[in-house]
Image (cartoon, helix red, strand yellow):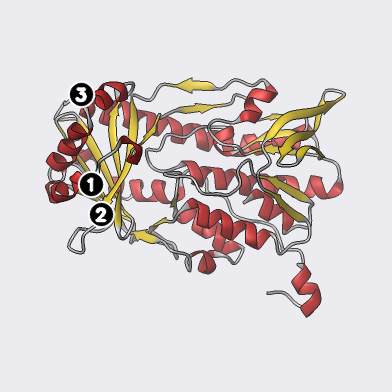
Amino acid sequence: MLALLLARQGIPVVLLEAHADFDRDFRGDTIHPATMQVLDEIGLADGALELSHRKIRQAVLPTEPPVVIDFGRLPTRFPFITLMPQARLLEFLTAEAARFPSFRLVMNAPVRELVRESGCLCGVRYQAPDGWRELRADLVVAADGRFSRLRHLAGVRPIETSPPMDVLWFRLPRGPSDPEGAIGRFGRGHILILLDRGVVWQIGYLIPKGSYAALHAAGLVVLRNAVAQLVPWLADRTDQLTDWKQVALLSVASDRLPRWYQPGLLFIGDAAHVMSPVGGNGINYAVQDAVAAANVLSGPLKAGRLRLRDLAAVQRRRDWPTRLTQVAVTQIQNQVLAPALRSESRAFDVLRVILRVPLVRELPPRLLAFGVRPEHVRLTRARTAADSQSGGER
């Protein structure tokens, strides 16, 4: 997203992708209304929605009676959570960026070293299939996720929290008579999250932190039985879980860098702040970081006068929304999810009572949809090569 926004300004940008393609299993793919609004502001929302996706218009919380979080009343063109394979979205964004002559994408190019001169970062060395390459730049942006190699290379350490859970991700077939949307179930120390992906359910099974080894040793039958107990209408499909290779373990983490920047280097997204999967905030806060960075840095980059205080301005804008969200999610994890995993049956009672208050009931969908301090694109678009040939803009 940042590469696209900078390329739209005519700023030369090279996007280094460590892998040969964008396909990863079970990577974040919930696109919230705030991100859809960003795409709309640059004329790409309708094109994105032409890609294969599902719309989640409500989420059902596992309370008794169930509490429904309804996105349908949100003040936006996009009153839903969009579920879309992240690989397809990335292909879409890079294809759009490629329309601008100032953009270049290099696949299969993992960064191995940072290049410094006079105490300032001035580029990177990456390992291409045919050998080492060095790339010089006024600014290096580390957007390499929760296992950021650039964090390690830059010698920075995050402030960590300790989420009390991990998540197992797997898929089961979805039947034509099944309910729609996002569904939560809990009971006897188990929590299950179901995401409607059309022909399949993407299922998250929450387990206490560090308990995966014991579950694995007990065998898949324990997992199958837990699914059948929590969601009886899935019982006839659990036998399709036949191998642990069908199950992906996500070790839930949450952290943030005290300082997101060094001379010539900026961290954004999970490289700056790893977000818990609770609420699906990771991809959306990464996009908000990208928009803020483009808004703040485009002018200095164009003028060739990028200063350290410009990088600091990006963190100042995005740091406190990130912290507030992480604090809120930590409270949900510690006060609601952790007790439920300990089989404390009243874990959701307070949440259910709070969400009965009319004004308060409107807050969860708004916070999930827009986060804290949503960003808006404040930049005009440069001409593409196609514009020059046709004499106009698309």
Residue 69 visible here: no
What residue sits right under mark 1 in the picture? Answer: 240
Q: Quadrant of the C terminus?
A: bottom right
The first of marks 2 and 1 along the sequence is: 2
Query: Is 21 placed left or right of 363 in the picture?
Result: right
Amino acid at the residue labelled 1: Gln
Amino acid at the residue labelled 2: Pro
Report the Cα–Cα distance between label 3 and label 1. Answer: 28 Å
Picture residue at 44% right of the left edge, 56% below the top: 84
Select label 2 or label 1 by which is in front. Answer: 1
Is 63 or 3 nearer to us in this picture? Answer: 3
Amino acid at the residue labelled 3: Arg
Q: Residues within 10 Å of mark 1 (few under 14, many from 20)?
A: few
Q: Secondary structure at mark 3?
A: loop
What residue sits right under mark 2 in the picture? Answer: 173
Q: Secondary structure at mark 2?
A: strand
Is 249 or 4 nearer to us in this picture? Answer: 249
Is 21 or 43 nearer to us in this picture? Answer: 21
Report the Cα–Cα distance between label 2 and label 1. Answer: 9 Å
The first of marks 3 and 2 along the sequence is: 2
What residue sits right under mark 3 in the picture? Answer: 342
Report if the CB atoms under discs 2 and 1 are less than 8 Å apart: yes
Report the Cα–Cα distance between label 3 and label 2. Answer: 29 Å
Report if the CB atoms under discs 3 and 1 are less than 8 Å apart: no
Query: Is 359 placed left or right of 267 in the picture?
Result: left
Query: Is 206 placed left or right of 110 in the picture?
Result: left
